């Protein structure tokens, strides 16, 4: 096994977080190398059934702005201003995400985003990528072992390594196997399967400026718009029980969709074929500590704290990691002068509480999306939250808005304030049936006393 000559800073994982981190480091004068296990990125279709369209929100946009690339990414985005709820009878109702015109989130193709970020990193900032290489182990001194597509292995020669290789991080698993860190992958008892809702006469068949959701209690279907006028639809079902992926097979998928999502069926011309060929994906939350090892290797993004996708914050949280980590690197000097152990420790101290908070809120949001959104009391509380936000600006901000549209408010603080506000909303609506019946003087007093 030969010792390779390489740069002093390396990133394992060339997905959105890895490429953004590479750009931020390059802007600080470093010369990162990116190791990516897959082939060179292309904006074309990816392997079916594993993509889950990404949702970009204010936190992610703020991170892209810090890297100077937000306008480059903007061309990939389709705005979504709210959830379009599809009832069994075919009725649709838009539940806005926020009250301001700017309070919307954006659907973006994972493949297109990967391609653009790679191009910006490589062409604009001179970042070197090595495709077809993956981490297959980590030595006791923190040196990753890299294997090329033809089976050759080498030690990754770098003074500092950032592992941004996603929820299934080989780096994290190698560190766990070595006893260097402790980690767990808490799998959800639900999985997902992706399908495509077709365009109609070359145009969107559904409102393109909404995240469409078919909530059915213990399961749901969602759909996010694509630039080619299709929608990426994702079915979330339990792994066991009825209905579940154990009971709904390719031969019964048609009948299941006709019963539960009848208005989506005309847009799924290849339902049985795609249902049979697309795999069932796993969903889960990653917990690990510490996030660093041997004062030279740091886990970032999903590699350290993957979450379920139901708050649309996985990528946004990873992008916040990249900015937070970059802010800890001095704006002057070279890597020989950096105190990496102190940087790693400060990074985990700052980010771990926020990672825990958004992981918990993402799980709560799944219950909301598949079940609570159908409840009249949920709608009343949501309507009242908007009314309190209008009447008491800055004093009351709905938790969803804090998470999605206020990057200046940390996830942990949004969770803390959100719990207090949820109790206030419960007390104000416990014996009312409309916002007009709410005692707003009492509301103001509760807000003053508790927030």
Image: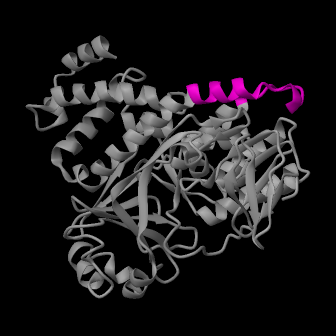
> In the picture, residue 181 is in which quadrant?
top right
Q: At which x and y percent is residue 97?
A: 40, 45
Q: Residue at (88%, 46%) from the top-left corner?
A: 7
Name the image colouring: one colour
Residues rendered magenta in the picture = 327-349
Residue placed most toward the observer, 416 or 185? 185
Residue 282 position, x and y percent, is 42, 62
Q: Main secondary structure of the magenta part?
A: helix
Q: Residue visible at 44% across and 25% down? A: 413
For this rendering, which residue is in front, 392 or 191?
A: 191
Return the x and y of residue 368 as percentages of the image width and height. Answer: 28, 48
Against 291, residue 42 (above or below) is below
Which image quadrant for residue 279? bottom left
The answer to which image quadrant residue 245 occupies is bottom left
The image shows residue 249 at horizontal and vertical percentages of 30, 81
**Is 199 rendered above or below residue 7?**
below
Residue 285 counted in the magenta span: no
Residue 345 covered by magenta stretch: yes
| Quadrant the N terminus occupies | bottom right
> Where 159 falls versus 115 (above or below)?
above
Specify whether 297 is left or right of 383: right
Q: Residue at x 44, y 66 (%)?
A: 281
| Residue 396 shown left or right of residue 217 in the figure | right
Total label count? Answer: 0
Pick the front one: 444 or 309? 309
* Residue 380 shown left or right of residue 177 in the figure: left
């Amino acid at each position: 096994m030969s010792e390779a000559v390489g740069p002093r800073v390396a990133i394992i994982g060339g997905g959105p977080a890895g490429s953004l981190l590479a750009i931020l480091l390059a802007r600080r004068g470093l010369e990162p190398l990116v190791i990516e296990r897959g082939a060179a990125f292309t904006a074309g279709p990816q392997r079916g059934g594993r993509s889950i369209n990404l949702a970009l929100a204010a936190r992610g946009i703020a991170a892209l702005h810090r890297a100077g690339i937000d306008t480059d990414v903007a061309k990939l985005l389709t705005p979504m201003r709210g959830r379009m709820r599809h009832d069994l009878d075919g009725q649709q109702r838009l539940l806005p995400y926020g009250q301001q015109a700017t309070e919307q989130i954006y659907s973006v193709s994972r493949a297109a985003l990967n391609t653009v970020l790679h191009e910006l990193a490589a062409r604009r900032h001179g970042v070197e990528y090595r495709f077809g290489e993956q981490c297959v182990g980590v030595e006791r001194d923190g040196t990753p072992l890299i294997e090329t597509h033809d089976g050759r292995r080498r030690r990754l020669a770098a003074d500092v390594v950032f592992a941004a290789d996603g929820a299934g991080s080989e780096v994290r698993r190698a560190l766990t196997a070595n006893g260097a860190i402790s980690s767990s992958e808490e799998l959800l008892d639900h999985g997902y399967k992706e399908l495509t809702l077709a365009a109609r006469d070359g145009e969107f068949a559904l409102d393109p400026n909404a995240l469409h959701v078919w909530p059915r209690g213990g399961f749901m279907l969602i759909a996010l718009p694509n630039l080619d006028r299709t929608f990426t639809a994702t079915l979330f079902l339990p792994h066991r029980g009825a209905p579940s992926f154990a009971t709904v097979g390719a031969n019964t998928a048609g009948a299941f969709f006709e019963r539960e999502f009848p208005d989506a069926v005309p847009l799924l011309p290849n339902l049985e074929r795609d249902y049979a060929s697309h795999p069932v994906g796993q969903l889960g939350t990653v917990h690990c500590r510490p996030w660093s090892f041997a004062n030279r290797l740091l886990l970032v993004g999903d590699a350290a704290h993957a979450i379920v996708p139901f708050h649309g914050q996985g990528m946004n949280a990873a992008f916040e990691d990249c900015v937070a980590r970059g802010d800890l690197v001095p704006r002057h000097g070279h890597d020989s002068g950096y105190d990496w152990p102190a940087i790693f420790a400060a990074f985990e101290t700052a980010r771990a509480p926020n990672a825990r908070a958004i992981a918990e809120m993402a799980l709560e949001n799944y219950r909301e999306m598949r079940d609570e959104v159908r409840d009249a009391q949920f709608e009343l509380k949501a309507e009242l939250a908007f009314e309190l936000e209008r009447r008491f600006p800055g004093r009351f901000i709905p938790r969803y808005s804090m998470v999605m549209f206020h990057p200046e408010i940390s996830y942990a603080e949004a969770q803390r304030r959100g719990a207090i506000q949820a109790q206030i909303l419960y007390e104000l609506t416990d014996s009312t049936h409309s916002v007009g019946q709410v005692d707003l003087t009492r509301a103001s007093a509760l807000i003053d006393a508790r927030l």
